[in-house]
Amino acid sequence: MKRLCTPAWIVRHVLTVALVVGFLALGWWQISRALDGNTLSWAYAFEWPIFAGFVVFLWVREARYTLRGGRPPSAEPPAPPARSTTPGVRRPVRAARPRLAAEGPDDPALTEYNHYLAWLNANPGARPADYPGLGRQQEG
């Protein structure tokens, strides 16, 4: 229990008590406002005690963690790090990727699309419906 009597923990104890008392007082204040006819205050009347409970939950969790010596509840002792002959920072591995076979220049759809892109580049303010090759594409 001496671990919970350090200056840092005394500040935590005081802060926990102050927050819980403050949150419960705010909840009581919201209940009195709700009883006077403010319907929105009913939500706050339940919200502030939940905040107080959350503060208590955190305080208990941190106190148990400290009393256990800073270990997680079901953690096994960590294994010693394995000895490695390689340095900690290694160069990335670069693997050659197979290149995809490009479509040949005799592909009519690709040729038409490239003409369309070239026309859009040459006419930046034009709409796609203004493309003169569109009629040629529909006829063929």
Image: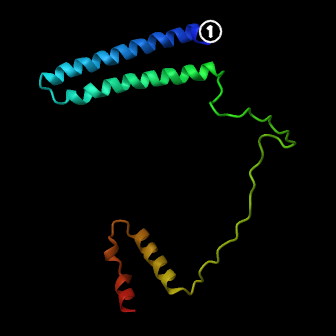
Q: Is residue 114 above or below residue 107?
A: above
Residue 20 placed where, x, y %? 38, 17
Return the residue nearer the eye: 125 or 44: 44
Q: Is residue 114 above or below residue 66?
A: below
Residue 116 placed where, x, y %? 43, 76
Residue 79: name its quadrant.
top right
Return the residue nearer the eye: 133 or 7: 7
Q: Is residue 110 above or below residue 16?
A: below
* Residue found 12% across the figure and 21% down from its top: 36
Residue 2: name its quadrant.
top right
Tally the marks: 1
* Residue found 39% across the figure and 86% down from its top: 137
Return the residue nearer the eye: 97 or 78: 78
For this view, does 81 lie left or right of residue 41?
right
Residue 82: name its quadrant.
top right
Q: Residue furthest right?
A: 85
Residue 130 placed where, x, y %? 31, 76
Residue 125 placed where, x, y %? 33, 66
* Residue found 51% across the figure and 21% down from its top: 60
For this view, does 82 lie left or right of residue 55?
right
Q: Residue furthest bottom?
A: 140
- According to the image, label 1 marks what residue? 2
Of helix, strand and loop, which one carries label 1? helix
